[in-house]
Image: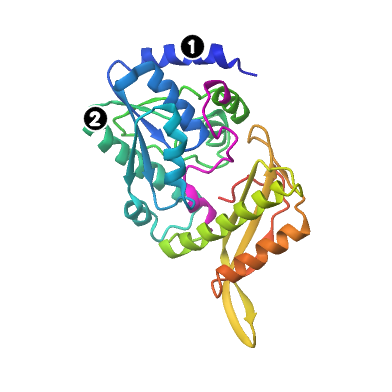
């Protein structure tokens, strides 16, 4: 396990050595990028700027949550709305690997523009060990391309700085707690956002459906945890599947989409166990999803697969 105090000192030293001029931080609002931003700000002061990108693929309230998370750290945060840009890049794409590559490329081009405005030539990322391990390479198979690793274009003019590269999620959280960063136990959210929770083609309409389903899962799980019916899972979310299924409302036939619910426990994101959710919780989720997405979602399923053989996210 990492020693947070020793890691902090060494990370600050390395960042100063790797950034002779200015840098921007790719801030997602998650614990990894927030820790990276905190360390970069400590190392570089006003020579660093954090950029949060609203990709149009975020959970409900994600931008506000990022502002709230960054507030106590005193790290400057710029919010850029690039929703149309990302959705345009994903138009017509169904292959999960191509989704991740396009998202990674779109991120980098946007960060290049933001770096030019700031006069920076370095990009600080919250890349952690599972990101590059799963992204593969010459000596290992590619499980899935992480947008912040394999999704980076070869011709990017930004030099990467990755202070958390050798840490696992539980170690990053330990560092976050030591730094006094709030929300260090907040559940992980994938960098590509809801694009990898929308199976098949990605559109503003399908993302909106996935966003509502994810919100319902989070609300109902949080409620079950608060009532003592469930220990808080590591991660809990909904996936919009690339299938349509017949349903019925009254005497009317409905042909809608299907949603799968996933609750898992893990410590380092390298392995995970599916959580045996209480049946009453699953029924509440199914009732709300089909009611609040009336006519759009007609079936709700529950994923009981561990990692391995499955990954935590579906794509």
Callouts 1 and 2 close, C-beta under 8 Å: no
Above or below residue 87? Residue 254 is below
Using the numbered discs, state the Cα–Cα distance from disc 1 to disc 2 in whole angstroms: 26 Å
Q: Which residue is mark 2?
A: 118
Percent across and percent down for residue 32 are 51, 31
Q: Is residue 123 left or right of residue 165?
A: left
Percent across and percent down for residue 270 are 64, 35
Taking the spot 56% from the left edge, 28% from the top edge, the residue there is 129
Q: Which residues are magenta?
A: 177-199
Magenta span main SS: loop
Q: Residues within 10 Å of mark 1 (few under 14, many from 20)?
A: few
Residue 279 occupies which quadrant of the picture? bottom right
Looking at this view, is 287 or 164 the one in front? 287
Q: Which residue is mark 1?
A: 9
Taking the spot 34% from the left edge, 18% from the top edge, the residue there is 44
Circle 2 SS class: helix
Looking at this view, is 133 or 36 the one in front? 36
Does 187 appear in magenta? yes
Percent across and percent down for residue 4 are 57, 17
Kindly tell me whether residue 126 is visible in this rendering. Answer: no
Taking the spot 69% from the left edge, 45% from the top edge, the residue there is 264
Circle 1 SS class: helix
Does 24 appear in magenta? no
Looking at this view, is 211 or 273 the one in front? 211
Q: Residues within 10 Å of mark 2 (few under 14, many from 20)?
A: some
């Amino acid at each position: 396990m990492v020693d947070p105090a020793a890691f902090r000192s060494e990370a600050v030293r390395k960042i100063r050595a790797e950034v002779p001029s200015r840098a921007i931080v790719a801030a997602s609002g998650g614990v990894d990028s927030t820790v990276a931003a905190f360390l970069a700000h400590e190392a570089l002061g006003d020579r660093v700027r954090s950029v949060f990108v609203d990709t149009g693929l975020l959970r409900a309230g994600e931008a506000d949550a990022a502002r709230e998370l960054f507030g106590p750290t005193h790290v400057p945060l710029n919010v850029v709305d690039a929703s149309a840009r990302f959705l345009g890049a994903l138009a017509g794409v169904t292959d999960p690997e191509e989704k991740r590559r396009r998202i990674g490329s779109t991120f980098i081009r946007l960060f290049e523009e933001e770096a030019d405005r700031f006069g920076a030539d370095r990009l600080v990322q919250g890349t952690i060990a599972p990101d590059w391990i799963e992204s593969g390479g010459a000596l290992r198979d590619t499980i899935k391309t992480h947008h912040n690793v394999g999704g980076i274009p070869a011709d990017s003019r930004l030099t990467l700085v990755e202070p958390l590269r050798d840490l696992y999620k539980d170690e990053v959280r330990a560092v976050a707690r030591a730094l006094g960063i709030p929300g260090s136990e907040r559940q992980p959210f994938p960098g590509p956002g809801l694009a990898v929770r929308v199976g098949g083609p990605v559109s503003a309409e399908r993302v909106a459906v996935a966003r509502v389903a994810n919100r319902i899962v989070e609300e109902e799980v949080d409620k079950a945890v608060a009532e003592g019916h469930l220990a808080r899972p590591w991660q809990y979310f909904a996936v919009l599947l690339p299938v349509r299924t017949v349903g019925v409302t009254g005497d009317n036939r409905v042909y809608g989409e299907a949603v799968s619910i996933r609750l898992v426990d893990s410590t380092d994101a390298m392995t995970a166990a599916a959580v045996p959710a209480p049946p009453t919780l699953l029924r509440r989720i199914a009732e709300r999803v089909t009611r609040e997405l009336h006519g759009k979602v007609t079936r709700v399923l529950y994923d009981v697969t561990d990692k391995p053989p499955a990954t935590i996210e579906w794509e």
